[in-house]
Amino acid sequence: MTGPSEHQPGLRTVALIKQVPLEGGTGELAADGRLRRTGLATEINPWCRRALAQAVRLAAGPAGNSTVVTMGPPSAVDALREALACGVDEALHLCDPGWAGADCLVTAKALSAAVTSLGPVDLVVVGRSSVDGNTGAVGAMVAELLGLPFVGAALAIDVDRSDEGVTLHTTVQSDEGSRSVHVALPAVVAIAERSCHPAKAPAELWPAASRIRTVTTSQLGDGRPAQSPTQVTQVCRQPRSRTPVMLRGPVERQAEEALDLWEARQALDPAPAGAPPGVPPRGWGDTFSRVVVLTGQPGGVGPQALLGEAAVLAAPLGAQVAAVVGPGTDPGPLASWGADELIVLEDDAPRPAAAALASWIGIHGMPLALLGAARSWEREVLSRLAVRFDSGLMTDLTRVATHTDGEGRIRVRGRKPSGQGAVAEIASRGPLQIASLRTGFLELRTPRAHSAGLPAWDLAVGAEPAVRCGPWRQDDDYDTLERAEIVIGVGLGVEPGRYAELLPLCRLLDAELAATRKVTDAGWLPHSRQLGITARSIAPRLYIALGTSGNTRHMSGVERAATVIAVNHDAGAPVFDHSDIGMVADWGAAVRALTAAVERRGETRAPKETSAMAEGRR
């Protein structure tokens, strides 16, 4: 990884950082209807620490300069004090009651106005996401507001200078894999967790708050508090649904008892008989209306579940589902999954694709809703469209429904995990209802019969001259975890050098491997294997948790598992609060005992080495 040096000018960088609760927050609403965040211990968002470190590194050298910006209550000044101690040159604190409870769009507007006030900049960096919400939208929204390209999540970053200007060369990590990207500056770049060491400084080295410049709404705009187009309307505390049976004693006996309990649970709660509900038939309402769905890569179960959900949403309204696809897409499966028509993009570069879709909507009318999966391409396109239509973005929803507001307009609202064991209800009051959905939470419906071809709109997409991308290098099958009936999840307590010890049990159970955020951030397993509030969710018949403390952010990703077996040597570990069966034992001994017990019961399936296991050994 190279950057500016004493012989090379530094860049003018801006790091946008966020302060987050240490334990993810309570998920409670205050009296004003906003999520309660005051009075909580906080820190700089872990991903923002990497953005901060890159901003300082890339600004090093003659004429370089780095600025850090955050938006938040008075207590957020501590994040800026630490950032100054880490080496940034100046700090801006956007602090005003008018911004309290701001959603992604209002936040992005304030941050982009702050960046503009600084004068010309070369690079704006943000964290890939935030651990308390995982919107992943602010960076792309800021890029759209500033008229800049957006790239992320970036790993190693090199600076190239030529007569044509300054270019960043990076390797981008996403749900689809990784690829090489060149982006001409200025640009907005989201930084991945593994890009560098995090920027940290002990509190005794933090400078006085007097070095920080405070900025209010009146200094960035017309002084009127901005109204967020999306809003948390209700937070429901989820009742505890798992009461663990704790096992102790010799690990061999624990393994036998755990399998007995699992078999008993399966007998009491067998898999549903028959096929799941079918995809509703094509909508033929009196008033032609649409639900537009960004399918991304049309293969796999994610787009299938998403289109089925859109069809269910559209059916009572007589609306049709328009699937946005790339050139050469086979329309047959899409029609069966719920699509009624196609919008075919000639290219998938996110910024021009968003512009083309906005123009199409301007000609053909506002759809009832615009939906996409919570994956990298869809996030950027949806975020840019949310800016263009001033509608905001409801992110990472696990369920959507329609309702009629007081003015008789059809609105979309949804639900998503929030804080510790809570679910937030999100509503939109923007002109266009835009949402990203976590497809792992959606029901996979029985495809409908469809024999006729689909009508299609061919949509020209302009070039993206600022960004050059290499081919994707796929490091995993993204849909593997969606299809798995049994999943073994590992935390930092399972060292990658010992992953081979899991292979016999994975083979016997035909199980796939999943991981916590810290495991994938360390590069021990592919990012697509991460489960939790900042990643993906699954619903296997059995989830076995090994070497994890049981952070609620991770365990929210398996809350729909039929049975959870947790293994931890500490009987007081929080992971047992999220499990049905608890084994108090060393994970290695427990795995060996479970493997032997399964072999004795003759439950051997066809030997199989999962792709994640192969990746772990590499």
Image (cartoon, rainbow, N blue to C red):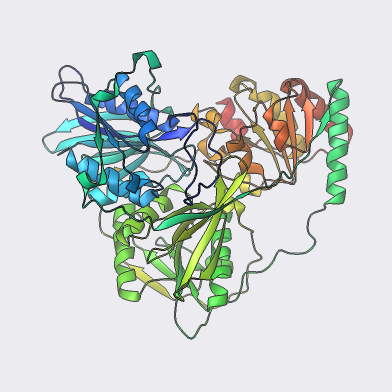
Above or below, 364 against 193 in this view is below
Q: Which quadrant would residue 264 be assigned to in this image? A: top right
Q: Position of residue 330 (x, y in %)?
A: 49, 64
How many numbered discs? 0
Of residue 217 and residue 480, the one placed in the foreground of this image is 217
User: Which image quarter is the N terminus in?
Assistant: top left
Q: Name the residue furthest top.
A: 204
Which residue appears farthest toward the left when viewing the image?
163
Which residue is found at the position 29% from the left and 60% from the top?
355
Quadrant (top left, top right, bottom left, bottom right) of the C terminus: top right
Query: Could you tell me if residue 115 is visible in this image?
Result: yes
Q: Residue at x 59, y 24 (%)?
A: 492
Residue at x-position 42% and y-position 32%: 47
x then y, percent, for residue 136:
42, 44
Residue 126 left/right relative to 423? left
Is residue 295 among what the camera can see?
no
Residue 261 lies in quadrant: top right
In-image side of 50 versus 408 (left or right) = left
Percent x, y of residue 132: 49, 39
Left or right: 116 as drawn, with respect to 209: left
The single residue placed furthest to the front in the displayed view is 31
Image quarter for residue 509? top right
Q: Is the residue 418 above or below the residue 5 in the image?
A: below
Residue 305 vertical placement versus 278 (above, below): above
Where in the figure is residue 498, as x and y percent of width and height?
A: 65, 21
